[in-house]
Amino acid sequence: MIDFDLDAFIAKHVTGRTESMFASDLAAHDAELRAAVAGASVLVIGGAGTIGSSFIRALLPYEPAKLVVVDLSENGLTELTRDLRSTDGQYVPAEYLTYPIDFGDAVFERMLQASGPFDIVAHFAAHKHVRSEKDRFSIEAMVENNVLSTARLLDLLLPHPPKHFFCVSTDKAANPANVMGASKKLMEEAVLAYSTELPATTARFANVAFSNGSLPAGFLERIAKGQPLSAPSDVRRYFVSPAESGQLCLIACVLGESGDIVFPQLESPTMLTFSTIADALLTELGYTPVRCSTEQEARERAAARAPGDTEWPVYYFASDTSGEKPFEEFYTSDEDVDLERFGALGVVRGVPRYDVAGIRAVRDNLRALFARTDVSKDAIVEELTTLVPTFQHVETGTGLDQKM
């Protein structure tokens, strides 16, 4: 593990902010947040991940009475609990429970019936990587988790609706170029359909700096293992800090109106390439990045490094993988956008394309498609294109699993 102040590095070299961009919105709406959360019963699904755990840390100062956290990662839940219990001054409700279970399973349904109803339900369990669309099986798992299980969760909540339901989306849902983005756009459609039956919101936002499984987090792993860094040099992304990601979701969850899609108001000059972050990280740690022309050269130079050598091999390349967009966007030209309600957040006023019955029909049709033994990736992409008309899949024949 590399010993340095990651939060300070993110503030200086990634976001360029020493104060949260949502600090003013949180202060302006403190009374509303406190009234909604204090004494509330809260369920967080996918709460061991970076965004889910950051949401929990943003939520706890408002003192809910009960917190139930569900996540497939037993180790992640253990670390979350240890971190909360070890932080000086951290409020943790007396009724605090963690469950390492799949929110799509019957076990979850029984837990929900026994522990609910909940005032707030925040849902972060998602397949988030573009790399998870390599073939029909990975796509099926992604759509099952992001769309079908989410619709099932909303069905489970209908008999006793929470006061606030939130489900995280992604900037890649705006004009999606990959299956992950299309699945999240379809998830948004499910949230909008059910928003007429229960208070439901979602949020699109930027990359979370050094989040679990992200490329920047991988830089730290590579350095700890003495391996070269590799990154695209042409893909530009917006970034928020982990703390900001949780605050954004809290605001969207509690202060959003049913059917809202919230996003951060970030400007194009703040976008960074991953190679820029890699260079800054190596420099911060006392190394000099040395550019290599191939992956093999980078591996060989890393293997040949002597103790104390301050040069670090890097391999930067032009992106050529399926589903990559060269830039990020948070809304499309035909969406109704409100940029005035909050200081640092914009709101897309969602218009449902489907009703609840329509989403259930989509669910049944997708499950029938996946049940076919002969179904191909192309056939699934074609079906998703029908369901999400803004989906324009970028297929290059190369996936991220083929990259270093």
Image: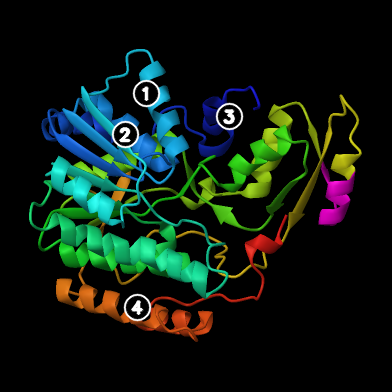
The image shows residue 373 at horizontal and vertical percentages of 47, 83
Distance from the alpha carbon under mark 4 to that under mark 2: 33 Å
- Report the residue at 31% width, 52% height from top: 103
Q: Which dot, 3 or 2, sits closer to the camera?
A: 2
Q: Are marks 4 and 1 in contact (CB under 8 Å)?
A: no
Mark 4 falls on what kind of element?
helix
Q: Is residue 246 above or below residue 322?
A: above
> Which corner quadrant of the image does residue 282 belong to?
top right
- Report the residue at 26% width, 50% height from top: 108
What is the quadrant of the N terminus in the image?
top right
Distance from the alpha carbon under mark 3 to that under mark 2: 23 Å
Mark 3 falls on what kind of element?
helix
Q: Are marks 2 and 1 in contact (CB under 8 Å)?
A: yes
The image shows residue 174 at horizontal and vertical percentages of 39, 65
Label 2 vs 1, first from the N-terminus = 2
State the residue position of label 3. Answer: 9
Taking the image as shown, residue 279 lies to the left or right of residue 44, namely right
Label annotation for residue 366:
4
State the residue position of label 2. Answer: 56
* Residue 177 visible to the viewer: no
Q: Residue flagged by tag 1: what amino acid is it?
A: Leu
* Numbered-mark total: 4
Taking the image as shown, residue 364 lies to the left or right of residue 126, namely left
Label 3 vs 2, first from the N-terminus = 3
State the residue position of label 1. Answer: 84
The image shows residue 117 at horizontal and vertical percentages of 11, 44
